[in-house]
Image (cartoon, rainbow, N blue to C red):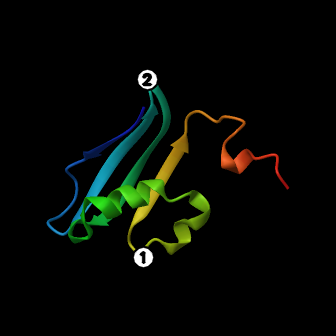
Protein backbone atom coordinates (compact mmCIF):
# COMPACT_ATOMS: atom_id res chain seq x y z
CA UNK A 1 0.00 0.00 0.00
CA UNK A 2 1.24 3.47 -0.87
CA UNK A 3 0.77 6.09 1.86
CA UNK A 4 1.64 9.76 1.82
CA UNK A 5 1.91 11.48 5.18
CA UNK A 6 1.81 15.29 5.05
CA UNK A 7 2.43 17.34 8.16
CA UNK A 8 2.16 21.11 8.49
CA UNK A 9 5.36 22.35 10.17
CA UNK A 10 3.48 25.35 11.70
CA UNK A 11 5.93 27.94 10.29
CA UNK A 12 3.64 29.30 7.60
CA UNK A 13 1.33 32.28 7.42
CA UNK A 14 -2.42 32.68 7.01
CA UNK A 15 -2.12 32.42 3.22
CA UNK A 16 0.93 30.17 2.78
CA UNK A 17 1.98 26.96 4.51
CA UNK A 18 5.09 24.80 4.85
CA UNK A 19 4.94 21.01 5.03
CA UNK A 20 7.11 17.96 5.65
CA UNK A 21 6.07 14.78 3.91
CA UNK A 22 6.92 11.08 3.85
CA UNK A 23 5.99 8.57 1.16
CA UNK A 24 5.89 4.88 2.07
CA UNK A 25 5.26 1.60 0.29
CA UNK A 26 4.04 -0.74 2.98
CA UNK A 27 6.54 -0.11 5.80
CA UNK A 28 9.37 1.10 3.57
CA UNK A 29 10.01 4.86 3.35
CA UNK A 30 10.75 5.65 -0.31
CA UNK A 31 10.85 9.47 -0.20
CA UNK A 32 10.96 12.31 2.31
CA UNK A 33 10.72 15.98 1.53
CA UNK A 34 9.50 19.50 2.25
CA UNK A 35 7.19 21.94 0.56
CA UNK A 36 7.68 25.60 1.39
CA UNK A 37 5.24 28.36 0.46
CA UNK A 38 2.18 26.33 -0.62
CA UNK A 39 -0.75 28.68 -1.18
CA UNK A 40 -3.46 27.38 1.16
CA UNK A 41 -6.18 28.60 -1.22
CA UNK A 42 -4.91 26.08 -3.82
CA UNK A 43 -6.15 23.28 -1.56
CA UNK A 44 -4.98 19.83 -0.62
CA UNK A 45 -5.25 18.35 -4.12
CA UNK A 46 -2.64 20.77 -5.43
CA UNK A 47 -0.45 20.03 -2.41
CA UNK A 48 -0.50 16.33 -3.30
CA UNK A 49 0.21 17.23 -6.95
CA UNK A 50 3.33 19.13 -5.84
CA UNK A 51 4.57 16.02 -4.04
CA UNK A 52 3.93 13.90 -7.13
CA UNK A 53 5.73 16.25 -9.52
CA UNK A 54 8.96 14.61 -10.63
CA UNK A 55 12.08 16.78 -10.26
CA UNK A 56 12.52 17.21 -14.02
CA UNK A 57 9.18 19.05 -14.19
CA UNK A 58 9.47 21.16 -11.06
CA UNK A 59 10.37 24.19 -13.19
CA UNK A 60 6.61 24.52 -13.78
CA UNK A 61 5.85 25.02 -10.07
CA UNK A 62 4.79 28.63 -9.38
CA UNK A 63 7.39 31.14 -8.21
CA UNK A 64 7.68 31.21 -4.43
CA UNK A 65 6.79 27.55 -3.90
CA UNK A 66 9.76 25.29 -3.21
CA UNK A 67 9.66 21.48 -3.26
CA UNK A 68 12.67 19.49 -2.10
CA UNK A 69 12.78 15.71 -1.85
CA UNK A 70 15.14 12.84 -1.26
CA UNK A 71 14.64 9.37 -2.71
CA UNK A 72 15.30 6.99 0.12
CA UNK A 73 14.93 3.77 -1.87
CA UNK A 74 15.91 3.53 -5.53
CA UNK A 75 14.77 0.45 -7.37
CA UNK A 76 16.07 -0.66 -10.78
CA UNK A 77 12.53 -0.45 -12.26
CA UNK A 78 12.09 3.24 -11.38
CA UNK A 79 11.34 5.35 -14.47
CA UNK A 80 14.49 7.43 -14.06
CA UNK A 81 16.63 4.34 -14.23
CA UNK A 82 14.83 2.62 -17.06
CA UNK A 83 16.95 0.54 -19.36
CA UNK A 84 14.77 1.47 -22.34
CA UNK A 85 16.33 3.74 -24.94
Q: Position of residue 9 (x, y in %)?
A: 25, 47
Q: Secondary structure at mark 1?
A: loop
Q: Quadrant of the N terminus?
A: top left
**Residue found 69% across the figure and 50% down from its top:** 80
Q: Quadrant of the C terminus?
A: bottom right
Between the residue at mark 1 and the residue at mark 2, the CA separation in whole angstroms equals 34 Å
Which of these two is toward me, 48 or 11?
A: 48
Callout in the foreground (1, 2): 2
Q: Position of residue 77 (x, y in %)?
A: 70, 39
Residue holding disc 1: 63
Of the image marks 1 and 2, the number of the one nearer the N terminus: 2
Say left or right for 61 vs 43: right
Q: Residues within 10 Å of mark 2 (few under 14, many from 20)?
A: few
Q: Residue furthest front?
A: 1
Say left or right for 30 vs 15: right
Q: Secondary structure at mark 2?
A: loop
**Residue found 22% across the figure and 54% down from its top:** 11
**Residue found 33% across the figure and 59% down from its top:** 47
Residue holding disc 2: 27
Q: Residues within 10 Å of mark 1 (few under 14, many from 20)?
A: few
Residue 27, by quadrant, is top left
Residue 64, by quadrant, is bottom left
Q: Position of residue 18 (x, y in %)?
A: 29, 56
Amino acid sequence: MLTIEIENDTTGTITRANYNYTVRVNDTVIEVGTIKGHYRADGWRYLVTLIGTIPAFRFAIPYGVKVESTDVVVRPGDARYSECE
